[in-house]
Amino acid sequence: MGMEKHYRDEELSEYLYPPEILQKLDFTKSPATFKPKISAASPGEDWMVVRPLQRSDYDKGFLQLLSQLTSTGNISKKQFDERFTQMKMSGGYYVTVIEDKRLAKIIGAATLTVEQKFIHNCSLRGRLEDVVVNDTYRGKQLGKLIVVTVSLLAHELGCYKMSLDCKDKLIKFYESLGYKLEAGNSNAMNMRFEEPS
Ligand code: 16G
Protein backbone atom coordinates (compact mmCIF):
# COMPACT_ATOMS: atom_id res chain seq x y z
CA MET A 1 0.00 0.00 0.00
CA GLY A 2 1.19 3.50 -0.85
CA MET A 3 1.26 6.44 1.51
CA GLU A 4 -1.83 8.06 0.06
CA LYS A 5 -5.04 8.25 2.00
CA HIS A 6 -7.94 6.21 0.75
CA TYR A 7 -11.24 7.98 0.80
CA ARG A 8 -14.65 6.60 1.55
CA ASP A 9 -17.61 8.07 -0.37
CA GLU A 10 -18.97 9.67 2.83
CA GLU A 11 -15.68 11.50 3.30
CA LEU A 12 -15.57 12.77 -0.26
CA SER A 13 -19.09 14.15 -0.13
CA GLU A 14 -18.46 15.72 3.28
CA TYR A 15 -19.55 19.37 3.40
CA LEU A 16 -17.58 22.19 5.00
CA TYR A 17 -20.80 23.44 6.64
CA PRO A 18 -24.42 22.26 6.71
CA PRO A 19 -25.98 22.75 3.25
CA GLU A 20 -29.55 23.23 4.50
CA ILE A 21 -28.90 26.83 5.53
CA LEU A 22 -28.45 27.85 1.86
CA GLN A 23 -31.83 26.48 0.88
CA LYS A 24 -33.76 28.80 3.17
CA LEU A 25 -32.02 32.08 2.24
CA ASP A 26 -34.60 34.71 1.23
CA PHE A 27 -33.40 36.32 -2.00
CA THR A 28 -36.15 38.97 -1.87
CA LYS A 29 -34.15 40.52 1.02
CA SER A 30 -31.28 41.41 -1.34
CA PRO A 31 -31.24 44.72 -3.23
CA ALA A 32 -29.83 42.84 -6.25
CA THR A 33 -32.13 42.36 -9.22
CA PHE A 34 -32.11 39.00 -10.94
CA LYS A 35 -33.58 38.64 -14.44
CA PRO A 36 -34.78 35.95 -14.60
CA LYS A 37 -35.32 35.37 -10.89
CA ILE A 38 -32.94 32.83 -9.42
CA SER A 39 -31.76 31.90 -5.93
CA ALA A 40 -29.38 29.50 -4.19
CA ALA A 41 -32.22 26.99 -3.95
CA SER A 42 -33.19 27.47 -7.65
CA PRO A 43 -30.12 28.65 -9.55
CA GLY A 44 -31.89 28.66 -12.93
CA GLU A 45 -30.63 25.43 -14.52
CA ASP A 46 -31.31 21.91 -13.30
CA TRP A 47 -27.65 21.04 -13.85
CA MET A 48 -26.47 23.76 -11.51
CA VAL A 49 -26.21 23.58 -7.73
CA VAL A 50 -25.14 26.11 -5.09
CA ARG A 51 -23.68 24.36 -2.08
CA PRO A 52 -20.93 24.39 0.55
CA LEU A 53 -17.45 23.23 -0.49
CA GLN A 54 -16.97 19.44 -0.38
CA ARG A 55 -13.77 17.45 0.04
CA SER A 56 -14.24 16.00 -3.43
CA ASP A 57 -14.08 19.49 -4.96
CA TYR A 58 -10.31 19.05 -5.15
CA ASP A 59 -11.07 16.79 -8.11
CA LYS A 60 -13.73 19.12 -9.54
CA GLY A 61 -11.46 21.97 -10.52
CA PHE A 62 -12.03 24.15 -7.45
CA LEU A 63 -8.38 25.20 -7.21
CA GLN A 64 -8.10 25.72 -10.97
CA LEU A 65 -11.04 28.12 -10.67
CA LEU A 66 -9.40 29.94 -7.75
CA SER A 67 -6.25 30.33 -9.80
CA GLN A 68 -8.27 32.59 -12.14
CA LEU A 69 -8.41 35.04 -9.20
CA THR A 70 -4.86 34.94 -7.89
CA SER A 71 -1.88 32.70 -7.25
CA THR A 72 -2.81 29.39 -5.60
CA GLY A 73 0.53 27.60 -5.70
CA ASN A 74 0.72 23.88 -6.21
CA ILE A 75 -1.64 22.40 -3.64
CA SER A 76 -1.52 18.64 -3.08
CA LYS A 77 -4.61 16.64 -2.18
CA LYS A 78 -3.17 16.13 1.30
CA GLN A 79 -2.69 19.86 1.81
CA PHE A 80 -6.21 20.55 0.56
CA ASP A 81 -7.60 17.93 2.86
CA GLU A 82 -5.79 19.25 5.91
CA ARG A 83 -6.90 22.80 5.23
CA PHE A 84 -10.51 21.62 4.74
CA THR A 85 -10.38 19.83 8.11
CA GLN A 86 -8.84 22.84 9.85
CA MET A 87 -11.44 25.21 8.43
CA LYS A 88 -14.24 22.89 9.45
CA MET A 89 -12.94 22.41 12.99
CA SER A 90 -12.28 26.10 13.52
CA GLY A 91 -15.73 27.16 12.27
CA GLY A 92 -16.47 30.50 10.65
CA TYR A 93 -15.42 29.45 7.13
CA TYR A 94 -18.24 29.34 4.62
CA VAL A 95 -16.59 28.46 1.32
CA THR A 96 -19.50 28.24 -1.11
CA VAL A 97 -19.45 26.97 -4.68
CA ILE A 98 -21.56 26.56 -7.80
CA GLU A 99 -21.16 23.21 -9.57
CA ASP A 100 -21.98 22.27 -13.14
CA LYS A 101 -23.18 18.75 -12.39
CA ARG A 102 -23.07 17.69 -16.05
CA LEU A 103 -19.31 18.10 -16.00
CA ALA A 104 -18.69 17.68 -12.26
CA LYS A 105 -16.90 21.05 -12.38
CA ILE A 106 -16.85 23.98 -9.98
CA ILE A 107 -17.80 27.07 -11.98
CA GLY A 108 -18.19 29.69 -9.25
CA ALA A 109 -17.02 30.27 -5.71
CA ALA A 110 -17.14 32.81 -2.90
CA THR A 111 -16.18 32.63 0.75
CA LEU A 112 -17.78 34.21 3.79
CA THR A 113 -15.48 34.31 6.79
CA VAL A 114 -17.03 35.21 10.11
CA GLU A 115 -14.90 37.10 12.59
CA GLN A 116 -15.81 37.17 16.27
CA LYS A 117 -15.82 40.59 17.87
CA PHE A 118 -16.13 42.23 21.30
CA ILE A 119 -17.49 45.43 19.74
CA HIS A 120 -21.17 45.87 18.90
CA ASN A 121 -22.13 43.74 21.87
CA CYS A 122 -19.91 40.78 21.03
CA SER A 123 -21.04 40.82 17.44
CA LEU A 124 -19.81 39.08 14.30
CA ARG A 125 -18.32 40.64 11.19
CA GLY A 126 -18.54 38.95 7.83
CA ARG A 127 -15.92 39.24 5.12
CA LEU A 128 -16.52 38.42 1.51
CA GLU A 129 -13.47 36.70 0.06
CA ASP A 130 -12.19 34.94 -3.02
CA VAL A 131 -15.05 35.57 -5.39
CA VAL A 132 -14.50 33.95 -8.76
CA VAL A 133 -16.72 32.77 -11.59
CA ASN A 134 -15.75 30.83 -14.70
CA ASP A 135 -16.18 33.36 -17.48
CA THR A 136 -17.40 30.85 -20.04
CA TYR A 137 -20.70 30.88 -18.08
CA ARG A 138 -21.24 34.61 -18.64
CA GLY A 139 -24.87 35.77 -18.75
CA LYS A 140 -26.09 33.30 -16.14
CA GLN A 141 -25.86 35.84 -13.28
CA LEU A 142 -23.48 33.53 -11.44
CA GLY A 143 -21.36 36.35 -9.98
CA LYS A 144 -24.46 37.92 -8.51
CA LEU A 145 -25.82 34.57 -7.40
CA ILE A 146 -22.73 33.50 -5.46
CA VAL A 147 -22.12 36.92 -3.86
CA VAL A 148 -25.76 37.41 -2.84
CA THR A 149 -25.80 33.86 -1.44
CA VAL A 150 -22.90 34.43 0.95
CA SER A 151 -24.08 37.97 1.78
CA LEU A 152 -27.52 36.70 2.82
CA LEU A 153 -25.77 33.92 4.71
CA ALA A 154 -23.77 36.53 6.67
CA HIS A 155 -27.02 38.25 7.62
CA GLU A 156 -28.64 34.94 8.53
CA LEU A 157 -25.68 34.07 10.80
CA GLY A 158 -26.06 37.38 12.65
CA CYS A 159 -23.18 39.44 11.26
CA TYR A 160 -23.62 43.16 11.88
CA LYS A 161 -21.86 43.98 8.60
CA MET A 162 -20.17 42.37 5.65
CA SER A 163 -17.04 43.84 4.06
CA LEU A 164 -14.93 43.25 0.98
CA ASP A 165 -12.01 44.66 -0.90
CA CYS A 166 -11.87 44.63 -4.68
CA LYS A 167 -10.43 46.12 -7.83
CA ASP A 168 -11.79 49.58 -8.75
CA LYS A 169 -13.52 48.21 -11.84
CA LEU A 170 -15.72 45.96 -9.67
CA ILE A 171 -17.11 48.74 -7.47
CA LYS A 172 -20.23 49.18 -9.64
CA PHE A 173 -20.95 45.45 -9.55
CA TYR A 174 -20.75 45.28 -5.75
CA GLU A 175 -22.78 48.50 -5.39
CA SER A 176 -25.58 46.86 -7.36
CA LEU A 177 -25.63 44.12 -4.71
CA GLY A 178 -25.91 46.49 -1.75
CA TYR A 179 -22.27 47.22 -0.87
CA LYS A 180 -21.37 50.88 -0.29
CA LEU A 181 -18.24 52.99 -0.36
CA GLU A 182 -18.67 54.72 3.01
CA ALA A 183 -17.55 58.36 2.91
CA GLY A 184 -14.20 58.72 4.62
CA ASN A 185 -14.08 55.03 5.46
CA SER A 186 -13.41 53.10 2.27
CA ASN A 187 -9.72 52.42 2.07
CA ALA A 188 -8.25 48.97 1.89
CA MET A 189 -4.58 48.83 2.88
CA ASN A 190 -2.23 45.90 2.74
CA MET A 191 1.16 44.97 4.07
CA ARG A 192 2.54 42.23 1.82
CA PHE A 193 4.80 39.63 3.38
CA GLU A 194 5.16 37.75 0.16
CA GLU A 195 6.20 38.92 -3.29
CA PRO A 196 3.21 38.81 -5.63
CA SER A 197 3.85 36.03 -8.15
C1 16G B 1 -9.56 40.26 -4.00
C2 16G B 1 -10.59 39.37 -3.35
C3 16G B 1 -10.00 38.79 -2.08
C4 16G B 1 -8.80 37.95 -2.49
C5 16G B 1 -7.79 38.85 -3.14
C6 16G B 1 -6.61 38.06 -3.65
C7 16G B 1 -13.00 39.55 -3.37
C8 16G B 1 -14.21 40.35 -2.99
N1 16G B 1 -11.81 40.09 -3.06
O1 16G B 1 -9.29 41.36 -3.18
O2 16G B 1 -10.92 38.00 -1.43
O3 16G B 1 -8.29 37.23 -1.40
O4 16G B 1 -8.38 39.51 -4.25
O5 16G B 1 -5.63 38.93 -4.15
O6 16G B 1 -13.12 38.48 -3.93
P1 16G B 1 -4.13 38.85 -3.67
O7 16G B 1 -3.61 37.51 -4.13
O8 16G B 1 -3.48 39.98 -4.32
O9 16G B 1 -4.13 38.92 -2.16
Image (cartoon, rainbow, N blue to C red):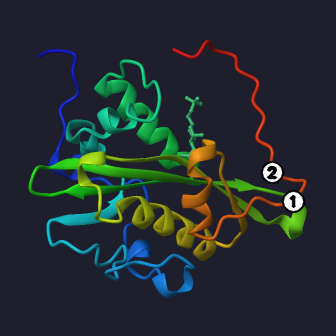
| The N terminus - image quarter | top left
Quarter of the image for residue 125 reads: bottom right
Judge whether 154 appears above or below 107 on screen: below
Q: Quadrant of ligand 1?
A: top right
Q: Residue at x 23, y 46 (%)?
A: 12
Question: Badges 2 and 1: C-beta atoms under 8 Å apart?
Answer: yes
Disc 2 to disc 1, C-alpha distance: 7 Å
What kind of element bears circle 1? loop
Please provide percent x and percent y for residue 6: 18, 32
Label 1 crowd bin: few (<14), some (14–19), many (20+), radius 10 Å: few
The extreme bottom residue here reads: 28
Judge whether 100 appears above or below 122 on screen: above
Q: Which residue is mark 2?
A: 186
Identified by mark 2, the residue type is: Ser
Please provide percent x and percent y for residue 107: 28, 50
Q: Which residue is mark 1?
A: 183
Please provide percent x and percent y for residue 192: 70, 20
Identified by mark 1, the residue type is: Ala
Quarter of the image for residue 36 reads: bottom left
Indicate left or right for 24 with 3 as reference. Answer: right
Total residue callouts: 2
Q: Residue at x 30, y 44 (%)?
A: 55
What kind of element bears circle 2? loop
Indicate left or right for 91 with 48 as reference. Answer: right
Judge whether 195 appears above or below 40 on screen: above
